[in-house]
Amino acid sequence: MSRRLLTALLTALSIWLMLLPANTARATDDGQEGLSSAIFAGGCFWCMEPPYDALEGVVSTTSGFTGGHVSAPSYQQVVRGGTGHVEAVKVVYDPSVVDFATLLDVYWRNVDPLDAGGQFCDRGEPYTTAIFVADARERQLAEASKQALEQSGRFDQPIVTPIRERAEFYPAEAYHQDYYRKNPVRYRFYRFNCGRDRRLDELWGDRG
């Protein structure tokens, strides 16, 4: 093969890769063709798994950490603070069944978007909220969703949940995964004592 032909082929391949839809590139990250993923921070990651697991089209949820500057942090490192990470949940979903906009709707109704200091009884940077976006389309949808909520008149305080660029996601230790299923009594006890549902009912009386 001539050098000129090889150069032309490589150039064509580069252009083709740039034109691929964003979710096609992300599908390989999740190990299953045709699937996409989204990352949301909503305080305790144990509590963010159930609403997504119950959603048709969601394949899996994983509790973990993202947004920080330490590689592969442990749970203890994150909760002590200083790593820059937040607790988050990675949602792997089938976009032919459920779309990113629906994931956003579920997200808002399971967090307190008015609280910049943490969520419910969990305080500090690791428990703050954030929507992580992977591309321009997700950012546009997230911004539109946030703006619609701001303009809805539901709240008389500003929405402080930021929309951030997607960063490396690190799964938490195995005992954190599916905690609400493995330890239902302890999970319910924690959730009740933390006041999560009480506050969510105040904010989202119609969340269902």
Image (spheres, rainbow, N blue to C red):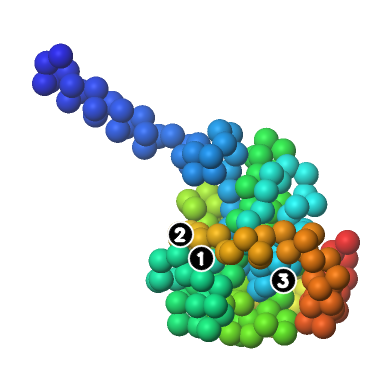
Residue 12 percent coordinates (x, y): 28, 26
Answer few, some or many: residues within 10 Å of disc 2's Cα (few below 14, many 20 plus, some between 14 and 19): few
Which residue is disc 2 drawn over?
Answer: 168
Q: Amino acid at mark 2?
A: Glu
Does residue 143 appear in the picture of this structure?
A: no
Answer few, some or many: residues within 10 Å of disc 1's Cα (few below 14, many 20 plus, some between 14 and 19): many
Which residue is rendered at x = 80% and y = 71% of the image? Answer: 187
Q: Quadrant of the N terminus?
A: top left
Which residue is disc 1 drawn over?
Answer: 66
Q: Is residue 172 above or below residue 61?
A: below
Which residue is rendered at x = 65% and y = 44% of the image? Answer: 93
Badge 1 element: strand
Give the Cα distance between marks 3 and 1.
17 Å
Asked if labels 1 and 3 touch by Cβ distance under 8 angstroms, the answer is no
Give the Cα distance between marks 2 and 3.
22 Å
First reached walking from the N terminus: tag 3 or tag 1 = 1
First reached walking from the N terminus: tag 1 or tag 2 = 1
Residue 120 percent coordinates (x, y): 73, 82
Q: Amino acid at mark 3?
A: Val
Which residue is disc 3 drawn over?
Answer: 111
Among all residues in the image, which is located at the extreme top?
Answer: 1
Which residue occupies the foreground of this view, 136 or 193? 193
Q: Amino acid at mark 1?
A: Thr
* Quarter residue 59 falls in: top right
Answer few, some or many: residues within 10 Å of disc 3's Cα (few below 14, many 20 plus, some between 14 and 19): many
Q: Is residue 177 above or below residue 1?
A: below
Asked if labels 3 and 2 touch by Cβ distance under 8 angstroms, the answer is no
